Image: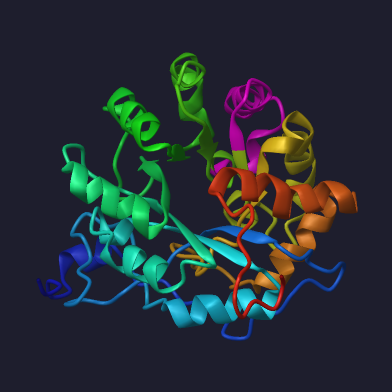
Amino acid sequence: MPMREAGSHQDRAPACPGPDPRPHGPTRYRVPPGAVDTHAHVIGLPPAYPFVDSRSYTPPEATAERYLAMLDATGMSYGVLVQVSVHGTDNRLTVETLRAHRDRLRGIAVIPLGLRDRELAELKEAGIVGLRLNILYGGGIGFEQLDAYAALAREMGWHLQFLIDARDLVPLAPKLGTLPVPFVVDHWGHFPVSRGLDDPGFQTLLALLRDGGWVKLSGAYRNSVEGPPYADTIPFARLLHEAAPERCVWGSDWPHVAHWQAMMNVGELLDLLAEWVPDEAARKRVFVDNAHRLYGFEGVVPAGSAGG
C-alpha cells in the first residue's frame, strides 16, 4: 500500500529529523555489562512499510543496522524495540528485526484485539513481551479497552506499556492499581517539568510507582523546559527513582521521533543518568537487573555486543 502524496495531511504530520549519526557512550561512567536500552524504534518507509494517515509526524527511515550500531557505540548489550506509532498495528518490521536478532532484542507490540491464537503465538515466539497503549500520537491504540488488553497480556505472560500524559493518570489511577499484569509508563508521563513537583499528575505517578508500577527513565528532552543539558529534570527523575528503585529502567528513545529542537547524542542522555541516579550500584540495577527481569533477558548472552 503506497503512502499518499504529501498535501494537507503532510502539514499535520510534519517531517522530523533523524538521530545524531555519530552516537557515543557516556563520558561520566562506564555502561555496565548486560545493560539494556528499553525504548527504541525501527522505522521503515512506504510502500514496503506504510505510514498511517492519522500519524502526528513523518519520520525518516531508522534501520535495524543503525540501531544495533548505536547499541555498540554506546556500550549497550541489549535493546527493546517498541512498535512506532506511524506504523500503527502493522508490526512486521519490528517482528522481522526481532527474529533476526533473537539473542539481543525484545519487543513491545501494538495490536488490535481479536487476533487469532496463531498470530499471538507468532508474536510471542518472535520476542514480543508486552503491548503498548498510546493516546499521545496518532496511530496508537487508546485506553478504551484497557481491561481487554490487560486480560490478553495476562494470558500471554506480557506486560502493558503506556504512552500517556501524566495528567491523564489521575482519573485512571484506580483502574491501573487493579491491573492483573505489570505496567510501565513511558518517559515518566511526558511531563513538562514546568508543572512542578506538586502537580497532581506527577504525584499520581509517584503513588503508582510506590504501589508496584514501573517507569522508563527516558525522554528528558521531551520533559525539559530549559533544554540541554536538561538539568531541570533532575529533581523529578530522582524522586521517580526513589519511589521505585527496583522498577525503573532506562531508554534512549532512539531515533528521537517527533522532536524538532536541537538533536542530542545518546551519550548526552546517558551522561544525564549520572545525575538522575548518582549511585553506581543503583544505576546498574536500572540498566541491568530491573530491565532483565521485566524483558526476559536473564541468562541470555548477546552475540557481537560491545557491552556484554
Image-quadrant location for residue 294 = top right
Image-quadrant location for residue 114 = top left
Q: Which residue: 64% across, 79% down?
A: 72
Note whether residue 130 is visible. Answer: yes
x and y percent of residue 171 in the render?
A: 45, 18
Q: Is residue 123 left or right of residue 268?
A: left
x and y percent of residue 6 in the render?
A: 17, 74
Q: Which coloring applies here? A: rainbow
Extent of the magenta region: 190-214
Residue 258 is inside the magenta segment: no
In the rendered image, which quarter contains the C terminus?
bottom right
x and y percent of residue 190 in the render?
A: 54, 44
Q: Which residue lies furthest to the front in this view?
A: 299
Q: Is residue 165 left or right of residue 223?
A: left
Q: Which residue: 77% across, 56% down?
A: 273
x and y percent of residue 110 in the render?
A: 31, 48
In the rendered image, which quarter contains the N terminus?
bottom left
Q: Residue furthest left?
A: 1
Task: Please count the marks in the image.
Answer: 0
Q: Is residue 304 left or right of residue 279?
A: left
In this view, the residue in front, 213 or 235, is: 213
Q: In this view, does 226 lie to the left or right of 134?
A: right
> Mainly helix, strand or loop, the magenta region?
helix
In this view, the residue in front, 88 or 138, is: 88
Note whether residue 84 is visible. Answer: no
Q: Which residue lies furthest to the bottom in this view?
A: 22
Q: Which residue: 72% across, 32% down?
A: 244
In the rendered view, tell whether residue 194 sits above or below residue 181: below
